[in-house]
Amino acid sequence: MEESLRKALELEAAPEDPSQYSPLALAYMGDCVYELLIRTAIISRGNRQVQKLHKETTALVNAASQARLMRELEPLLTEEERTVFKRGRNARSTAIARHASIADYRMATGLEALLGYLYLSRRMDRAVELVGTGLEKTGEWNQE
């Protein structure tokens, strides 16, 4: 078990070509990547009560916020990144958008697919750059 976890953390089990995964599988992974980046950034602001950390996190980890972020980032994407984003955005999901418009939900899914793709491509530096830029451009990171 420990060896499996070590391989997962080192991405040894990652596919040679992440584009082989379905856009929804990429979004599944990207959802985790996005939340981890946001939680890491929020906790770096200092130790607080867990419910305050959770409130700050959920303000940024939701379809509407992710869609706003993606709208700012879309012009900055490479052609490869734009293709992955569009695959995710256009994927037909059986999930229902709760508390979000269908347009926002699809934009958020596209962002998550892109982040999952970058993670599995071992390009976390680009994922961090995009999320950081998006948060700055939307002004959401400055809200405390």
Image (cartoon, rainbow, N blue to C red):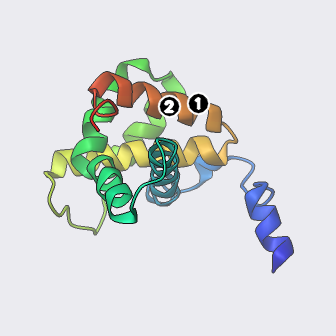
Q: Amino acid at mark 2?
A: Glu
| Secondary element type, mark 2 | helix
Residue for badge 1 = 126
Residue at horizontal 15 percent and vertical 54 percent from the top? 100
Task: Tell me: 14 left or right of 112.
Answer: right
- The answer to whether 52 is drawn above or below residue 81 in the figure is below
Most foreground residue, 24 or 36: 36
Task: Tell me: 66 left or right of 115.
Answer: left
Q: Position of residue 67 (x, y in %)?
A: 27, 40
Residue at horizontal 43 percent and vertical 19 percent from the top? 76
Question: Looking at the rendering, in which quadrant would you find the C terminus?
Answer: top left
- The answer to whether 49 is drawn above or below residue 36 in the figure is below
Q: Position of residue 139 (x, y in %)?
A: 28, 26
Residue 31: which disc?
none
Question: Looking at the rendering, in which quadrant would you find the N terminus?
Answer: bottom right
> Which residue is most to the top?
75
Q: Amino acid at mark 1?
A: Arg
Residue at horizontal 36 percent and vertical 24 percent from the top? 136
> Which residue is most to the bottom?
1
Residue at horizontal 61 percent and vertical 52 percent from the top? 20
| Secondary element type, mark 1 | helix
Q: Position of residue 96 (x, y in %)?
A: 21, 66
Most foreground residue, 35 or 143: 143
Determine crowd level at label 1: few under 14, some 14-19, many 20+ residues with C-alpha closer than 10 A: few
The reply to whether callout 1 and callout 2 are in contact (CB within 8 Å) is yes
Q: Position of residue 82 (x, y in %)?
A: 44, 30
Determine crowd level at label 2: few under 14, some 14-19, many 20+ residues with C-alpha closer than 10 A: some
Residue for badge 2 = 81
Q: CA distance from mark 1 to mark 2?
A: 10 Å
Most foreground residue, 140 or 89: 140
> Counting residues from the N terminus, which is met first, the one under dot 1 or under dot 2?
2
Which quarter of the picture shows residue 14?
bottom right
